[in-house]
Image (spheres, rainbow, N blue to C red):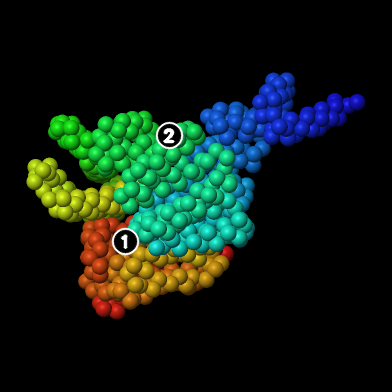
Amino acid sequence: MPVRNQKFVFLSILNILLSVIFASTTLAAEVNTDSLIQVLQSTKIDSVKANILVKLAKTQEPANKNQAIKYYLEALEYESDESTKALTYNSIGMNYLQLGENSESLQFFEKSKKIYQELNDSSMLGRVYNNTAVANYWLGNSNEALNFYLRALEIRKPLNDTAGIIKIMNNIGLIYQDWGLYNDALEWHQDALSYALEVNAYYDLSYTYANIGKCYENLDAYTPALKNYRLGYKNAIKSDSQNKKNSYLSGFLGGVYRRMNMPDSALFHFQKSLDYSQRIANTNRIAIAEYELGKTYFDINQPDSAKKHITRSYALSIENNYVNLLKDNLFVLSELAEKEGNTNDAYQYLKEATQLKDSLFNAEKISKFTDLQVKYFNQQQQQENLILKQNNEIQQITIREQKLKIWIFSAFGILILITLIFIARSRMKLMKLSRKLENSEKKLKQANADKDKFFTIIAHDLKSPFNGLLGLTTLISENFDELPQLEMKNLLLELKNSAANVYALVERLLSWSQIQTGKISYKKEKTDLSKISTNVEKQFVTSAKNKNISLEQQIEKNTFVIADIESISTVLRNLVSNALKYTNPGGNITISAKQKNNHIAVSVADNGVGIDEAKLGKLFSISEKISEPGTGNETGTGLGLILCKEFVEKNDGKIWAESKPGRGSRFIFTLPAAG
């Protein structure tokens, strides 16, 4: 028998044996694992090794996710099929996600996403988008999470992927809950419930009822909240023998009972949440349950029990970098220390909790801003040196020409005419070169003057809010014990708003600097402009509704352009955000597009307050800062339109504005049309 046929027969028999071994999982899991390991040790074929290691990983996933991850990683060493690699990366990410290690999970979801994009596998790409959104959500990146959820939903709806649609709608609802838009969140969760009831999926029903309960709880409607939590609990028991979901649901029930001032019931359910969390070894849920128990014991004046649980939660939060939970624990520890009469510890805990948010904002952003200034001044110095070098070269050329004239006149008088012609031509060249250098110098000085003025404006804009921040923190620190609670709350709210304004300004400045230094990469490709516009419309629909403004996307499908999706999405978001800011309640905003020759002209029009002619010509100038409060007293950084101009020009387009005071504005930019 030929060698190739022998190998084929061997592989066929081996695959049959593996299928038989793996099918016996439900009968004898330990025997199955041992059998797979024996086959793994005996085979020398990479594809078979990879297959066995994946099956070993699946046997470990329910109880030992760390071991499952090790098997998956080892399988990747032998796997050659790209689609299987992508699926394995996604499985590793899911295991890290379920362990609460969200940053690790994102790394593997990104690897999976890149492969599925290359393979153009939209079905699996939708799943990876959803998983990436979940990881971003747990890391606190709500905007990134919403972006990936909407992408995933756009893929899964045409595929009639009911299970995927239910998960995404629920998770979008969770983001709206985080933003305090509970009625909007309730609509998403109820839409998800209608899908889940159609297929009678216990797990999805449990998850959806829990989210609906949370919306009602936040709306202070405790009776429907308890009803939905119990329905979620009931369906969770049917869907999961390990009761993973009940670690959440027990915690939710405990939270409602605590808000209803029923501490005994609250403690009962929080303890059940801790038991479930320890059973599935999820450190994040354990830390949350310990905190809830400690907080409840503190509320009923049992400080010893409170301190025991809060201390455990505090240790887990430090170990696993649960920043928000760490802050909450610090506040409770401060109150416990104060109750014990230990004012020094109470003050220290309170100081750490208060400074936690400041440190997250200031350290990285201010460092980047300082680096930007250093790079700018170094670049300016290099340009000045270049001008000096060019001037020296001109001077040296002139000296050489003068020496040449003396030598010619003294040695070759007969060639005076020729010499004069040569000198005339040389001087003409020098004059042209000099004019070019003068023009370059003027442009360089003007560019430097514009940038100097730009940084002067930015420095002034940063100084004022930082002075406000320093003033507020000084007022709070020096008068902490005397300030009434309501006044303290108002001061902290003012402090938060001031910090948010500074953050937005620095974020825009960093984006501008990345454009100037060429650190942003552009991937220009054929893309449907209507899809970009629709995604932008979805992101602002709530803001428009809150301000009673009609926001309408009119770009027709299959309006194709050649552009970088991310940068053009940023341009549209900036223009729509500005339109919302300067349009009165009851106004209208439209996004439209029209083909003109080889370009598509995109328009964002409103019937808002408009712009006077004097300011209209300065909107896109780096040396002019145009920023007016919106119709709802919204504030801005003055950098948005500068970034828009940079991004549009990088995409081979132009941008301009048309406006009259009291009659609204129209911002138009062009992009190359796709053939």
Q: Residue 631: x percent and y percent?
A: 25, 70
29 shown above or below 459: above
Q: Residues within 10 Å of mark 2 (few under 14, many from 20)?
A: many
Residue 546: quadrant of the picture: bottom left
Q: Residue at x 26, y 78 (%)?
A: 662
Relative placement, left or right, of 135 versus 664 is right
Query: Left or right of 611: which side holds 649?
Result: right
Residue 245 in percent (x, y) is at 50, 44
**Secondary structure found at label 1:** helix
Determine the secondary structure under disc 2.
Answer: helix
Q: Earlier in the sequence, mark 1 or mark 2?
A: 2
Judge whether residue 93 can be spotted in this image.
no
Identify residue type, mark 1: Leu
- Classify 10 Å Cα crowding around label 1: few (below 14), some (14-19), many (20 and above): many
Location of residue 337 (image quadrant): top left
Label of residue 205 in the image: none
Q: Is residue 133 above or below residue 59?
A: below
Please identify the quadrant where the C terminus is shown: bottom right
State the CA–CA distance, disc 1 to disc 2. Answer: 45 Å
Q: Residue 82 lies in what quarter of the image?
A: top right
Residue ID at (14%, 32%): 341
Q: Amino acid at mark 2?
A: Thr
Instruction: Give the position of the N terminus as an image quadrant.
Output: top right
Residue that badge 1 annotates? 641
Residue 578 lies, in percent from the top left, at 32, 65
Where's residue 514, x and y in %?
A: 35, 47
Give whichever of 179, 670 is nearer the camera: 179
Label 2 belongs to which residue?
283
Q: Name the residue at 30% across, 33% down.
A: 305
| CB under 8 Å between discs 1 and 2 | no
Q: Nearer the viewer, residue 510 or 121?
A: 121
